[in-house]
Image: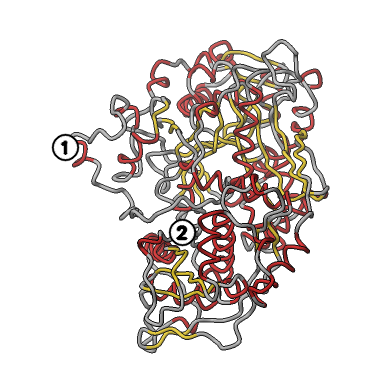
Amino acid sequence: MAEKKKMKSEASSSNSNSSGGQNSSRAESVVMDVGRRRSSCGYCRSASHTSISHGLWALSLTVDDYQALLDRGWRRSGCFVYKPEMERTCCPSYTIRLEASEFVPTKEQLRVSKRVQRFLDGTLDVRKPEKVMNEWSISGGSCSSSQNESANCVAMEFSSGDHEEQKNQGEQIIHCLSDQIDIVVQEYVKSAFSCDLELPKASVKVVAPAKRKLLVEGSEDLLFTSNVSFQISAALRQAKKGIGHVQYSKCSTEENGQYPEISPKLIAEILARHLKEVPESCGLSIRACNGHINFYSTGNQNMYNDIVKSGTMWKQLPAESGRKHSCLNKIFVTSQGKRRQLEIRLRRSSYDPEEYSLYRKYQLRVHNDTPDQVSEFSYRRFLVDTPLIFVPPTGDGTVPPCGFGSFHQQYLIDGQLVAVGVIDILPKCLSSKYLFWDPDLAFLSLGKYSALEEIRWVKENQVHCPSLQYYYLGYYIHSCNKMRYKAAYRPSELLCPLRYQWIPFDVAKPLLDRKRYVVLSDFASLTKGEPLPPTTLQNHMEDLHGDLFSECKDDVFIHEDVEMIELDSEDSDVDSEPETSSSPPAAAEDGDVGNILIGMKSLRLRFKDLCQAFGSSERRYMETQLQRYMRAVGAELSERIVYQPDLPLTRMQEIDE
């Protein structure tokens, strides 16, 4: 334990030098190898220490060396650098990246950008929702809720410009209703389940006139519909299959104590009840029908047809339309003209009390951490400390205007800090490390928005630094549903864990559907959509850890913040068993431990020039440690990065002399 604290202290103290510029520290990488680590897994929630990785404490790292480590599957948490042992760990983690210039946003990602822009323009007015307190009760397959339903958040969008600036008012209604469903889903469904459930974003569609079905009384017309209930039901099935159970609120069980099967029909009925107030204020009625949430016109049916077809503005609704429409006009008057200003600042990594306050709020409310888990010390060690040596701009096209190193990208709305992206800017990429945001603005999906901004930043800075081409999203974990959202940023590539070649995600996905650990480069010749050979299909049907999560056609990519789980060496075990592998990296076979660069206080020598200073047993111990280290970082980096051996200080002084 004392040795662990010594290594942490040395790594943290070196941070002030590393971040102070090249002139304040030697431009070299210095690491201490801590070997294999076993810890509990934050992805599969394993109770035992099934997460296995190789760790290094970095006293300093050049940006070139860290870029090379990223391209071998490494990643950092503060000054601790780690790499999953892909064949052994419970949740294999594949480095994922995309080429920024080739990025094609999805409809959902474009929708996030538009929603943020509407919020800034003042055309998206959001009232803070009351906490939904109703618990559902199920008896005999039916669902009933308390008569005292709490008011839902109203997130209404209105036109504030000329007619030509609005393509279709029907689209505005769709955005409004979609936002309402999202809020109710987040507030209600998450309160009913205690599992870590990823919820889909609602999509509301216009029902074509030819497909509308009049009700029996003929007084209403079906205008809009959403199938989000089917997506929620699919998410529940996946969660139940993945973790073995789904925990419901106490009154969510049937009388026999068994957990019910939550059908789309039941979910639609629940959501419709909690959404009742919003469509009524819009002159619409809502009804659940066979799992769909349907919105019908009431009263002036022709007026809504005109809105959907011709783009009539909310402010053009006639006064004689009734009380409900005048309510819309009132909200429009109070919400229009409230413009907000977004400012994005890029700052070198350093402690900021305002950032820490936001981080604490985020961790407590979003991740349900306890106060002692979000101390200032842990925040500094996780997101502020960095071993990267800052490289200032040169003006010659090799370094961007901000320089290379570790940064915090701040997002401020009207001067208030609302999100912080922790990133590393390296010679070939922007590597996204972590993001925390204001929980009060969850409806803006700032995690997705920040990812789009970071991709845009890479594109813009290619002019200043042509080598800066990629956006690294961290690890993609196919066996963990909450981490699959990263594949929504397309076209992406995954790093082969053996030969360190980049393989298109579309080639890798069918392989990972069948097996958690795959040598992706074995299938590099496959093209998108090409079926796997029969022998390959048979070999990959085996799964190392039971059934994988299955996908269905209704699945959608769900955003979770760019997340990295910090590996705390005090909460993990050092694995002392011999490290053998049936297929070690090819680079390790060509290396010679004699060429590894060793740091002994003031000395920098190759091991072959230093081995005579060791006794026979000490030399054998060092050779074993160095072989393990070289397998992990590769022969080339082992000859460039300074390896500081784990020897008593007195022994190091003797050798140094």
x and y, in percent, of residue 379 in the image: 72, 48
- Identify the residue at image location x=41%, y=25%: 501
Residue type at mark 2 is Val
Foreground: 95 or 637? 95
Residue 206's label in the rendered image is 2
Nearest to the eye among marks 1 and 2: give it.
Answer: 2
x and y, in percent, of residue 589 in the image: 38, 19
Residue type at mark 1 is Pro
Do the numbered discs 1 and 2 sit on residues whose CB atoms are within 8 Å?
no
* Image: 96 above or below 314: above
Q: Residues within 10 Å of mark 2 (few under 14, many from 20)?
A: some
Q: Quadrant of residue 88?
A: top left
Direction from residue 291 to residue 335 in the image, left or right: right
User: Circle 1 sits in a helix, a strand or a loop, which is it?
Assistant: helix
* Image: 565 above or below 262: above
Foreground: 184 or 427? 184
Residue bearing mark 1: 534
